[in-house]
């Protein structure tokens, strides 16, 4: 909390991608960065936004469900998937989620060779049968293979592409499997 005596001294700027929007008549937005230890965590936000410009503005209770965080453990994801999928499919999908996390956490560096990242992408493909995911993986693999030899290390451009792929893949995965 900001001490009221310091309201005129601080300006808060939080990029949109780091939080949720709480609109007030479509003109003002406040962002919150939240994390969840397990998928489908429900949050409720309410309170008062204190502003030296517009005074105290009540924030009515707003409830939302946070589907998933990229840092959630694959075990927690698997437990949630078991509610709607068979044991076999839940395990398969949780492994795909885990591998995408592993790629993002361990292979998005210029120390990674094209061969190493391709092995990870091939492993990820083994756990997926959904065409839209396979197409995304093949697309990034194709770009990397067209531009780099197997023993060549990823350059900054390819590292960014792998990071972008992991973000897009995770968002697609969450939207499709954690309904």
Image: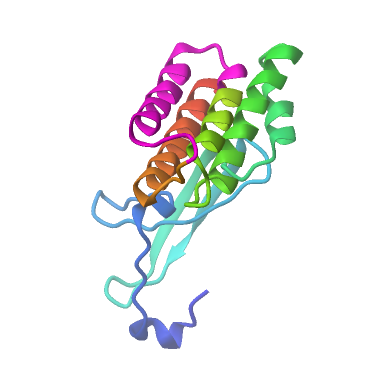
In the rendered image, residue 138 lying in the magenta stretch gets the answer yes
Tell how many labels.
0
> On screen, 4 above or below 113?
below
- Residue at 54% x, 43% y is 104
- Nearest the eye: 43 or 38: 38
Residue 29, visible in the rendered structure: yes
Q: Quadrant of the C terminus?
A: top right
Q: Position of residue 84 (x, y in %)?
A: 66, 15
Q: Position of residue 92 (x, y in %)?
A: 67, 19
> On screen, 49 above or below 60?
below
- Nearest the eye: 27 or 166: 166
Relative horizontal placement of residue 121, taking residue 53 as reference (left or right): right
User: Which color scheme does this rendered protein use?
Assistant: rainbow
Q: Position of residue 138 (x, y in %)?
A: 42, 21
- Tell me where residue 145 sits by quadrant: top left
- Tell me where residue 131 sits by quadrant: top left
In the rendered image, residue 170 lying in the magenta stretch gets the answer no
- Nearest the eye: 2 or 116: 116
- Nearest the eye: 104 or 142: 142
- Residue at 26% x, 50% y is 25
- Tell me where residue 29 sits by quadrant: bottom left
| Magenta segment boundaries in residue numbering | 125-151
- Residue at 38% x, 62% y is 14
């Amino acid at each position: 909390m900001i001490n009221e005596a310091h309201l005129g001294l601080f300006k808060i700027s939080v990029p949109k991608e780091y939080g949720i929007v709480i609109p007030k008549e479509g003109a003002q937005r406040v962002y919150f960065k939240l994390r969840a230890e397990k998928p489908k965590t429900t949050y409720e936000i309410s309170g008062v936004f204190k502003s030296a410009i517009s005074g105290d503005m009540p924030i009515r209770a707003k409830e939302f469900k946070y589907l998933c965080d990229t840092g959630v453990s694959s075990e927690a994801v698997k437990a949630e998937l078991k509610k709607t999928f068979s044991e076999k499919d839940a395990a398969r999908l949780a492994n795909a989620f885990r591998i995408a996390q592993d790629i993002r956490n361990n292979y998005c560096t210029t120390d990674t060779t094209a061969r190493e990242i391709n092995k990870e992408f091939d492993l990820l493909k083994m756990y997926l049968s959904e065409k839209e995911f396979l197409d995304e993986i093949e697309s990034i693999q194709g770009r990397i293979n067209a531009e780099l030899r197997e023993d060549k290390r990823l350059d900054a451009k390819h590292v960014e592409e792998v990071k972008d792929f992991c973000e897009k893949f995770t968002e697609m995965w969450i939207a499709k499997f954690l309904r």
